[in-house]
Image (cartoon, grey):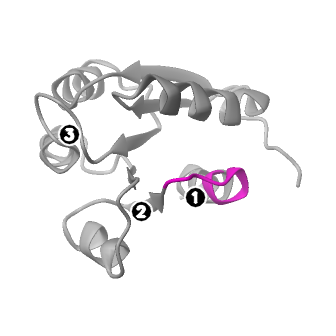
Amino acid sequence: MTIPNWEDRTILIVEDDEISMEFLTELLAPSNVKIVVARDGKQAVNFCENNKAIDVVLMDVRLPKMNGKEAMEEIKKSRPDLPIIAQTAFAMSGDKEKYIQSGFDDYISKPIIMLDLIQKISKHFTN
């Protein structure tokens, strides 16, 4: 697999779990993408409203202060075209459809596989 060069792109990773955050950062490091980190939903909303350079959001759905769905809804009010990818460790049958119907642009379940993550992000970078 060829790793894309995203040095001119910015991803906001919204994740309250330190190990998951480090894992995602390591997965994306070879792409040279700029990574911005938020630890809760409120912080994610603030970052998206104040940083127009964010190209994609990778949003955990279980977050403190404001959950991922609530944060996504708030972000979409000011940035309706910003792609937001839901991520969850609690994947159930039908979850992808549920998250897409609720307003997320895409969905990925944990454990995250690098190829899947790169493909999903690439799709939203090219749209």
Check disc 2 and give the amino acid type: Asp
Q: Which of marks 3 and 1 is in front?
A: 1
Q: Give the range drawn in magenta.
A: 110-117
Residue type at mark 1: give it.
Answer: Lys
Question: Is 66 left or right of 41, judged from the image as shown?
Answer: left
Rendered location of residue 26, percent (x, y):
68, 28
Disc 2 marks which residue?
106
Q: How many marks?
A: 3
Q: Is residue 97 magenta?
A: no
Q: Disc 3 marks which residue?
A: 75
Q: Give left or right: position of 61 versus 11.
A: left
Q: Name the residue under label 1.
A: 120
- In 3D space, how far apart are the residues under numbered discs 3 and 1 (Cα atoms)? 20 Å
Camera-nearest residue between 98 and 80: 98
> Secondary structure under badge 1?
helix
- Disc number lying in front (2 or 3): 2
Side of 124 where 117 appears, left or right? right
Mark pair 1, 2: CA separation: 8 Å
> Decide: marks 1, 2 in contact (CB < 8 A)?
yes
What's the mark number on residue 65?
Answer: none
The residue shown at (32%, 51%) is 81
